[in-house]
């Protein structure tokens, strides 16, 4: 886990260009406290910078790294888990690998296969490789977007970095608000596709790469998608076969993610996903006591799952560590987190995630977690709500037989008690409509704009961009076959990258590496191929995953019906210990003069916010983001 920066298309003084790269590196020093380095090509048109967190072969993985003949140079962020297998293959082909660094493996893999090396990589990665012979720059990001990669390209110059703040630190790109990105954020609390909240700064999308070439005064950029999950349904095998194969894939993914030359541990929430990872990892470490890290709040049992986490820790024989998070830290912490995030995304779960990462950093340099389990194994209650409505429609209008892979109402009824804790979601979903088009109904389940758009001025939201239309392009992609695939596919492409942004920034703020074995692309591809009538049989959430890890985790964990994710007592804080901070921020003169908000509506929102509501959270994040990055007096420092 590291941080990279680069500028391609420089034409001025090489020393000035080097100073610019250094400034970019300095603002992401937290990503790599173990070392730094700068590379400039012979013509001075390219500069690469790197901050290193040493995990694999700590003594020999210094970056930027070049091949022995200096023909190729790389800066790399992430981990290639199958680097040992690739290393043996490359040595067999005659390549002179001298270290056990996955960075060197990446270099020679590119020399052997060019851009076609990327599909061979198993891991999380964002990297840039300079080819001195062809004078081309090749950059790629992993399939699921676990590692970040942002860039600015104006046709004449290309800037890129692991974090947006590094691009801004170059002094070559101004921080301006992107109106379309703001509309996305108010709708979903994240941006879709390549958009960010910053005008003229975009993200390289997951599963994409690009090649950049200098042509006279221009930098030509060619972006390519090298991977996309295919929902080619396997009609040959039965449920037992799928379960056995899935268990083997999960086992192998965890085993590969344990490759490290420094101490490692694991996040443990007490839910099924992290518990399965912890139990498998503890078993594979052959009796070594792995550290586990758990966070909780004292605001009531709904915010404290330490009892379940302790059950797993005892069962797996791990060394248990916990932290209780105090709302008194909220006012000081949130502005810092917004700085680390670059742009707000997802919900207040980033607060406990940061504290748990800080706790982990006291003991280890690598942590495993269960991120991605809900999207891959069908774990969100909203999936069940949407399917229930679809089943009701099919039963009432006798249309179920018209839908391939449809779940019948009869099969789903026994699992309805799962929705006992989701009455507000059901009321909100059915309160203003029923039985509409699938895309409209799922959009309603994830749309957060109802409590947000009336808080912003009409001028702030003007424009012809439609977040719903952008949502449709992803949700209605051809070849998805069923409602459950459309929902999980959208979340895989849209909401999961936002959660992974939180994962990356909170771990990097604590200077530790976070690994997510359940997002091994082989597991994602395998789940996509399972018939929906098997993997979502009877509307049973995480049905396949539970069966695959049944012998691995305590039965009390696999049979839990009360798991709520990582809820944060935000409303208790904003109306209690942090009330003054919230009021001073959102009703300040600066906020009033920004021209973004309907201040009277904001005042009502502060009083009316319900438990687990996101309106006040969204307002706080947007206002603090403006203060940190957009305002003329904003200073970019940690």
Image (spheres, rainbow, N blue to C red):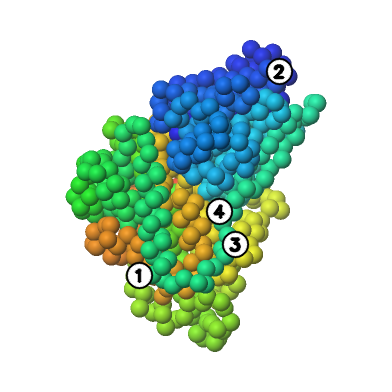
First-in-chain label (1 vs 3): 1
Quarter of the image with the N terminus is top left
In this rendering, the answer to whether 622 lies above or below 43 is below
Tell me the mark number nearer the camera, choosing from 1 and 2. Answer: 2
Give the tally of numbered discs. Answer: 4
Mark 3 — residue? 475
Lower position in the chain sequence, tag 4 or tag 3 = 3
Give coordinates of residue 138: x percent, y percent.
64, 35
Residue under the image location 51 percent in, 39 percent down = 89
The answer to whether the residues at label 1 and label 3 have Cβ atoms under 8 Å apart is: no
Q: Residue 493 carries which label?
A: 4
| Mark closer to the observer (2, 3) | 2
Residue matched to label 1:
418
Which disc, if any, is residue 43?
A: 2
| Marking on residue 612 | none
Q: Using the numbered discs, state the Cα–Cα distance from disc 1 to disc 4 in whole angstroms.
A: 26 Å
* Left-right relation of 2 to 471: left
């Amino acid at each position: 886990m590291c941080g990279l920066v680069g500028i391609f298309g420089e034409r001025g003084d090489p020393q000035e260009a080097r100073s610019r790269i250094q400034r970019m590196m300095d603002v992401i020093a937290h990503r790599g406290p173990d070392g730094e380095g700068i590379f400039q090509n012979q013509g001075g048109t390219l500069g690469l910078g790197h901050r290193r967190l040493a995990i694999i072969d700590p003594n020999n993985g210094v970056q930027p790294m070049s091949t022995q003949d200096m023909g190729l140079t790389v800066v790399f962020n992430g981990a290639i888990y199958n680097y040992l297998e690739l290393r043996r293959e490359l040595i067999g082909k005659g390549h002179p690998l001298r270290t056990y660094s996955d960075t060197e493996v990446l270099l020679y893999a590119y020399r052997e296969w060019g851009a076609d090396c990327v599909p061979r990589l198993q891991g999380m990665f964002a990297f840039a490789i300079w080819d001195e012979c062809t004078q081309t720059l090749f950059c790629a990001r992993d399939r699921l977007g676990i590692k970040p990669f942002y860039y600015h390209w104006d046709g004449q110059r290309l800037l890129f970095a692991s974090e947006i703040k590094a691009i801004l630190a170059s002094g070559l790109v101004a921080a301006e608000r992107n109106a379309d990105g703001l509309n996305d954020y108010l709708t979903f609390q994240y941006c879709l596709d390549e958009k960010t909240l910053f005008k003229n700064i975009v993200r390289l999308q997951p599963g994409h790469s690009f090649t950049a070439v200098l042509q006279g005064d221009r930098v030509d950029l060619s972006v390519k998608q090298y991977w996309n999950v295919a929902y080619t349904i396997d009609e040959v095998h039965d449920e037992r076969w799928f379960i056995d194969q899935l268990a083997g894939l999960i086992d192998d993914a965890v085993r590969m993610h344990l490759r490290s030359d420094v101490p490692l541990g694991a996040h443990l929430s007490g839910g099924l996903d992290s518990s399965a990872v912890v139990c498998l990892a503890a078993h594979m470490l052959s009796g070594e006591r792995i550290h586990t890290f758990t966070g909780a709040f004292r605001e009531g049992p709904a915010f404290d799952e330490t009892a379940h986490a302790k059950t797993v820790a005892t069962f797996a024989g791990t060394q248990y560590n916990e932290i209780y998070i105090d709302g008194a830290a909220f006012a000081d912490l949130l502005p810092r987190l917004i700085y680390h995030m670059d742009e707000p995304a997802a919900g207040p779960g980033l607060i406990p995630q940061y504290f748990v990462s800080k706790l982990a950093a006291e003991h280890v340099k690598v942590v495993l977690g269960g991120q991605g389990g809900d999207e891959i194994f069908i774990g969100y209650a909203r999936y069940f709500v949407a399917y229930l409505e679809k089943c009701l429609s099919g039963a009432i209008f006798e249309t179920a037989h018209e839908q391939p892979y449809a779940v019948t109402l009869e099969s789903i009824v026994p699992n309805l008690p799962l929705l006992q804790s989701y009455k507000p979601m059901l009321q909100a979903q059915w309160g203003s409509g029923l039985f509409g088009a699938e895309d409209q109904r799922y959009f309603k389940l994830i749309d957060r704009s109802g409590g947000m758009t009336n808080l912003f001025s009409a001028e702030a939201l003007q424009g012809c961009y439609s977040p719903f239309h952008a949502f449709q392009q992803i949700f209605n992609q051809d070849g998805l076959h069923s409602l459950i695939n459309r929902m999980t596919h959208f979340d895989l492409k849209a909401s999961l990258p936002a959660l992974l942004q939180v994962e990356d920034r909170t771990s990097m703020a604590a200077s530790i590496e976070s690994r997510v074995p359940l997002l091994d692309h082989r597991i994602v591809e395998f789940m996509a191929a399972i018939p929906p009538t098997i993997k979502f049989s009877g509307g049973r959430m995480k049905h396949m995953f539970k069966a695959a890890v049944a012998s691995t985790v305590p039965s009390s964990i696999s049979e839990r019906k009360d798991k709520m994710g990582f809820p944060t007592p935000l409303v208790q804080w904003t109306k209690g210990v942090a009330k003054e901070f919230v009021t001073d921020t959102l009703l300040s003169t600066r906020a009033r003069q920004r021209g973004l908000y309907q201040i009277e509506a904001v005042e009502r929102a502060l009083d009316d916010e319900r438990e687990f509501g996101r309106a006040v959270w969204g307002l706080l994040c947007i206002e603090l983001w403006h203060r940190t990055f957009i305002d003329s007096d904003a200073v970019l420092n940690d």
